[in-house]
Image: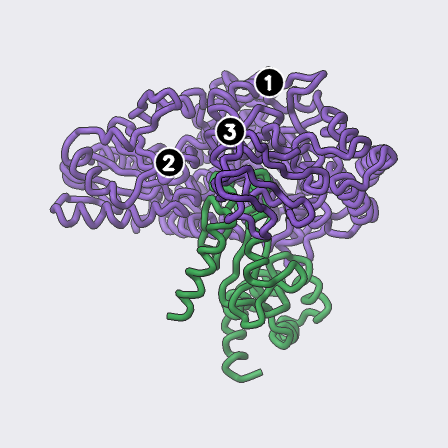
Chain colours: A green, B purple
Amino acid sequence: MKTEEMKKLDEIMQAHNFSPNLVIAIMQDIQKEYHYLPEEHLKYIAKKLNIPEAKIYGVATFYENFSLDAKGKYIIKICDGTACHVRKSVPVLEEFRKILGVTAEKPTTDDMMFTVETVSCLGACGLAPACTVNDEVHPAMNPEKARELIKQLKEESAS
Amino acid sequence: MMKIRTRQELDQKQREYLKSLQNQKKQILVCGGTGCVAGGSLKIFAKLNEIMLEKGINCVVKLEKEPEHDSVGIKKSGCHGFCEKGPLLRIEPGGILYTKVKVEDCEEIVEKTIIGNEIVERLVYHDSNGTAYPKQDDIPFYKKQTRIALEHCGKINAESIVEYIAEGGYQAVAKALFDMTPEEIIEEITESSLRGRGGGGFPTGRKWASVLKQTEEEKYVVCNGDEGDPGAFMDRSMMEGDPHKVIEGMIIAGIATKAHHGYIYVRAEYPLAVERLSIAISKATARGLLGKNILNSGFDFDIKISQGAGAFVCGEGSALTTSIEGNRGMPRVKPPRTVEHGLFNKPTVLNNVETFCNVPPIINKGAEWYKQYGPENNHGTKAFALTGNVVNTGLIEVPMGTKLREVIFDVGGGVKDGEFKGVQIGGPSGGCLCISATENHLDLNMDFDSLKKVGAMIGSGGLVVMNHHNCMVEVARFFMQFTQNESCGKCVPCREGTKRMLELLTDITEGRGTLEHISMLEELADTISNTALCGLGKTAASPVVSTLKYFRDEYIAHVVDHKCPAGQCKALVNLVIDPDKCRGCTKCARMCPVNAITGEIKKPHTIDTQKCIKCGTCMDGCKFGAISYE
């Protein structure tokens, strides 16, 4: 790991007083920075916070929001909460997966542009079915809108 | 920012701030709830500001001190509740509500309603008969509601402590500090019969009394904002729309139980709630309403925010506290209860967001006032997130004991795209209420005890309306999949049992089910609910048990006739085109993603069932209603 990255991690841990109790918050900040939790980073904070690597790994794999794999530039989360489900969120999810050629097992495109995931509930049930792209909510989705959204994101990224 | 040092100063500030608010000629409240923000309300907020600046209108974004008499206040409020019609805009005085507002409408709104006193007719809510309702309170959706926990949501600036104080905020803290002993506070809460709004319905007063009784010095107050039930967003709206009320409720719990530290556990999926709460905590601290020696009473209380990381089970008390401590959020065996060994192994008051929001009004107005709402032992109101196939999706609050019929048809405006079939209440731990051959729950009172009698529960308050296109077996499978995903894996009944139940349900929805599947489901449901470690596991089978009780016919149809009566289970249905209705417009053939539809122009088309993936795109697109499930 480069020194500057270590410095970055030290800053994050400093903001949480190097407290082992706040390891979840620390990992959230790391993920915010890198979009996932790189293995060597976890090893580094384990040493610094003086907690076993096994425990860090346990926490990182327990919570849905943490990812040990790198994600795409655009993270698309399709809500599959009850309200979205009964208003047909599954066809939207299938459409995204189909156009991007990804699956539940391999959620990220090879060019690291898109990651497609589901989320249990965004709490935006009034807008069902909803999805988010990097935390921006897109309401009342359907397969057609999904196609347009991808087109738009590709254009945005190219320009 | 000026510190408020004493109770007298608080009273004085309230009067000052209230006067400032009343001095404003007009106020525009742009809904800043998640729903309306997604619909573009922040752009509307910016545009309105821009237009007023251009026109030289003295507009006040932030209420600091006494503004001039002709100023116009503009602010982002919390969720107004009528999410279906967002983005929403409320204009005071007059309580005018504009619905589905667009950026292009802003100019006209400023011109007509702000400068003039005219109402923009086309932005006003119209019901299905075309009747216009310019005033928010007259709209049927709002008329039947009673807002206690949500009283400020949509009415005040969610980021302003000044407005909260003007509305009488933190007065309940002052009352609890100076006029009441901890025992009296608990007595008042017990007398009001306030019960936990998170799902269990445990009496709040009794919980607080247990914590007060503990002799340990260090105690905690924890607010459970890990609203993970799919289809629920009440707590989110309260944290986003009225964060100071949550804080005030927590301080009072601290005073009553002699605890000095609070934590709010918020799910990471709610970034706006985290932001608003953080702003509120720092403002309350700056004002001296949080921190050391609050209002010179000698009482200290601080609050920290702890963010979840996506685990439904963390809504369970012992899992939540261990998650705050930085561990895997797994429940532990009880007793000891959280009131004895909670956060950091210390006595802990753990209540839900909505429960805390009910506390300040009870302290201010008294238990007697609170008891005018709802039936005996179930007093007060309950917020529900009304979603699914209902005309008016949104956030509502009604007195406990309101009939299901009133909630769905009067407030909700009826069922969307079909006939009423049932509602799923209480999320993955709850059950369904319905009309079936033997039952009619429409006239059932919605309160803790009445719902328990029919095998459902209020839960946190998610209310998902289903029409006759929704298959109940599929719904049960959906919830089992959710619970199975969220099972923490610590105890065998939940870890293995939910997995087996999911397999059985999947078999049924995919056409491989037999009658034996149903009896195995029942046996497993019984075992899991009797042996699982925590609430998540114990109630995991509820949706299955409840749908089996009321919609057994539908299960039988799946396993015996291999048919899905609702036409939702794809393996059991075929899409067909009615040759009498089809005009041969070719739209469906063009829309079909797998080219399964063929036919000549102006002649009836046909679907190749071998190719068809049953996505339903053609059915949704057909203008003549010619395509349906067999």
Q: Name the residue under label 3.
A: B416
**Foreground label between 1 and 3:** 3
Q: Where is residue B574 in the image (x, y as percent from the top left)?
A: 67, 39
Choose between A113 and A81: the one closer to the eye.
A113
Identify residue type, mark 3. Answer: Lys
Q: Is residue B349 above or below residue B275?
A: above
Q: Mark 2 points at which residue?
A: B154
Q: Where is residue B347 in the image (x, y as percent from the top left)?
A: 65, 44
Q: Position of residue B596 (x, y in %)?
A: 61, 48
Say which residue appears at 71% left-offset and 70% top-offset: A52
| Chain containing the residue with disc 2 | B
Q: Is residue A146 above or below residue B400?
A: below
| Chain containing the residue with disc 3 | B
Say which residue appears at 64% left-offset and 51% top-offset: B311
Choose between B191 and B609: the one closer to the eye.
B609
Q: Distance between the residues labelled 2 and 3?
A: 26 Å
Choose between B451 and B302: the one closer to the eye.
B451
Q: Mark 1 points at which residue?
A: B442
Q: What element carries label 1?
A: loop
